[in-house]
Amino acid sequence: MATKDFAVRTEPHVANLGALGELHFIPEVFGDEFLDGYTQVQAAQAALSGEQA
């Protein structure tokens, strides 16, 4: 299984995705809201890659 380390940022920041564009992050989500959103992102990524979760 691949792993990825993440740094938690407390200031707004931009992730450059090259030809796909940019993601603009504003760190204002707290607790369960973040976890719920992260679960949705993981599910979407799995669906795009054809993985079964």
Image (cartoon, helix red, strand yellow):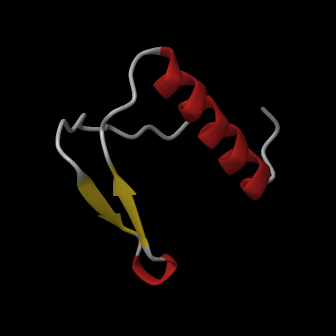
Instruction: From the viewer's side, name the closer residue of 6 and 22.
Output: 22
Residue 50 percent location from the top left of the image:
81, 52
Task: Give the quadrant of the N terminus.
Answer: top right
Q: Quadrant of residue 10?
A: top left
Residue drawn at (23%, 37%), measured in percent from left and top?
7
Q: How many marks?
A: 0
Residue drawn at (59%, 25%), measured in percent from left and top?
36
Residue 44 percent location from the top left of the image:
70, 47
Q: Residue furthest top?
A: 31
10 vs 17, left or right, is left
Q: Residue furthest front?
A: 28
Residue drawn at (66%, 49%), measured in percent from left and top?
45
12 vs 42, left or right, is left
Q: Quadrant of residue 18?
A: bottom left
Q: Residue furthest left?
A: 11
Residue 19 percent location from the top left of the image:
47, 84
40 vs 15, left or right, is right
Task: Give the quadrant of the C terminus.
Answer: top right
Q: Is residue 24 above or below residue 12?
A: below
Instruction: From the viewer's side, name the closer residue of 46 and 29.
Output: 29
Instruction: From the viewer's side, name the closer residue of 30 and 53.
Output: 30
Residue 16 percent location from the top left of the image:
34, 69
Q: Is residue 18 above or below residue 32?
A: below
Q: Is residue 41 above or below residue 29?
A: below
Residue drawn at (24%, 34%), measured in percent from left and top?
8
